[in-house]
Image (cartoon, coloured by chain):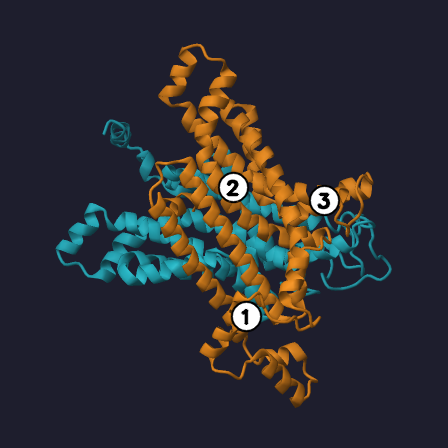
Chain colours: A cyan, B orange
Amino acid sequence: MSQASPAVVSSAHGQTPERERGVLYKLWQKPKSRYSMLILLAVIAVGIVGPWLAPHDPTKPYYESLLAEPSAEHWLGTDAIGRDVFSRLLHGARVTLMVAVMAVSITFFTGTLIGITSAYVGGIVDQVLMRIMDILLAIPNIVMAMAIVAILGPSLTNAMIAVGIAGIPKYARLTRASTLAVKSSGYVEASRAVGTSNARILLLQILPNIMSTLLVYTTLQIGIAILDTAALSFIGLGAQPPTPEWGTMLSEGKEYIRDAWWLATFPGIAISVVVFSVNILGDALRDILDPRTN
Amino acid sequence: MKQYVLQRLASGLIVLFGISIFSFALIHMIPGDPIRIMLGENASAEQVHALREQLGLNDPLPTQYLNYMTGVLQGDLGTSFKTGRPVLTEILERFPATVKLAASGMALAICIGITMGVLAAKFKDTFIDFTAMSIATLGVSIPNFWLGILLILLFTVKLGWFPIAGGTGLRDLVLPAVTLGVLASTVISRLTRAGMVEVLSQDYIRTARAKGLHERAVLFVHAFRNAMIPVVTIIGLQIASLLGGTVIIERVFDWPGLGSLAINAIASRDFPLVQGIILFIGVIFVLVNLLVDILYSLIDPRIEIGQAKEGGA
């Protein structure tokens, strides 16, 4: 109780109480999360306008400069058939972002649906759904994604779907746990007692209250999705050449590792910077929204 | 205790059953005709018919599953479509290399992770703590296959300390094991730090310090053993992600293990082999988890039924 009083005092002085300030504001207050937000905004900007910024066509070979070192003409060098690495990286930002958003959407919607259903309906439905999740969890994420690609056939879209599906079991378990915690709280019991419909309870009470936990894990899941899709592309089961995808570029870079260090370096830096920023942001969100789990 | 072990065994069996269904169903989930995909466009009707017969795809589904499982229980995982050799033989040939790599990676991960975690907790909120935890975050953010490529670039191409790739000797093992170990160590170091920080704030640690115990004794005799309980669980769970991690790392270093076998099987659409590998990895993982759960209940008698899983998620 005593912790609440400073906030009351400050609001009496016309300031916004600390806990009512927006999450974005709090993120902005910390240098770590501020920088990672700025980096991610920059990456999103590149994802949108990158193709117009690129000095060269990402799929056009310059046969007169194969495996050229970084220079004024080709800032990050060229690859084995003379394509401009910098232009390919810029185009790759869009591919990476799209993949991340699509894959995480699949994970988020399906996982949340399964988790909430399991926790809210309970009983045999809960048992069956969670046993299925256990079974899927028994296969490592990337192997699961590979199995799904084996079924659907190798392509960027299928890799995206595979990564999205592979993330579902963990997510469903998490949603279930959070829903159970909310479900047993006094206010849900109370509204059930006064005859509120299930749909209203789910939409207006359960969902808003588990949202902060979900937001944290969705953010962290973006990083995992980017890494897993890049890995699938790297082993040839994701994006196919000549798509300028960062994982595929690394795979090509590995082939020429003795001759061209830049090919195997810059796409990796790009992936790492994006995922690192996402993870820092996720950690910061967790500190703000879900302090108990840290 | 006995009841707990039995319960774990039972749920392990259910999961195993589920995995067998999943690996069995794999070939039936393929959009289009799997036989056509395997044989290619130019296959004759006879070839298609023969392979369909051979794989038993004409039987009703329950019969197919029963036949599949009868085979599996007798160690017959089918025949590789590309090489014509038994799937189990192919897998067992590659498995030792993967175990060697995963075990070395795990050993390194435990050493690195626990050292960094204890140091970070001991020097909480100092530069050491900050550095160790930044490395941990960086470790999960860098694609581990890229870390492998960077190590090759530095130690093989520039310095020439290690052979380029392809062998399975001790010198070939160093770089892939380090790559794997760094990845797995990040989770261990975070958890060790969290456990140690919590334990170090307990009363019995204050008592130990107050009675004049040497700081090293406080740290390693009193704190460490109690902080290690969750770490042991996560080490067990890490084995799964290591098995997954090796798949990609094997590709980077041309390591002839289960991972490269899986990648080739998928690329060449050798479905019987893919099914076998999925089943095999699933079974290994379930067995390891079962072992960890049971060991865990031995280390920590406070454990109650159904708690082990929640703690690891």
The amino acid on which the numbered mark 2 sits, given as a three-letter code, is: Ile
Mark whose residue sits in front, 3 or 1: 1
* Mark drawn on residue B71: 1
Report the residue marked by disc 3: B173
Give the image location of residue B10, x and y in percent. 39, 56
Q: Residues within 10 Å of mark 3 (few under 14, many from 20)?
A: many
* Amino acid found under the numbered disc labelled 3: Leu
Percent of width and height locating residue A232: 62, 59
* Image height of B298 relative to B255, above or below: above
Quadrant of the rendered image containing residue A243: bottom right
Same chain shared by disc 3 and disc 2 = yes
**Residue A292 shown left or right of residue A32 in the figure:** left
Furthest residue in direction top, as rendered: B212
For the C terminus of chain A, the image quarter is: top left
Residue A174: where, in percent of width, then height? 39, 51
Question: Label 1: how many residues lie within 10 Å, few (<14), some (14-19) or many (20+)?
Answer: few
CB atoms at circles 3 and 1 under 8 Å apart?
no
Q: Which residue is mark 2?
A: B235
Numbered label tally: 3
Q: What residue appears at the point 56 percent right and 47 percent down from the top-left corner?
A: A275
- Percent x, y of residue A78: 78, 55
Mark before the other along the chain sequence, 3 or 2: 3
Q: Secondary structure at mark 2?
A: helix
Quarter containing the N terminus of chain A: top left
Marks 3 and 1, the one that precedes in the sequence: 1
Mark 2 or mark 1, which is nearer the start of the sequence? 1
Report in which chain the residue with disc 1 lies: B
The chain holding disc 2 is: B
Which amino acid does the dot numbered 1 rest on? Gly
- Rendered position, B30 above or below B294: below
Q: Residue at x 21, y 51 (%)?
A: A188
> Who's the residue at 74% across and 53% down the image?
A254
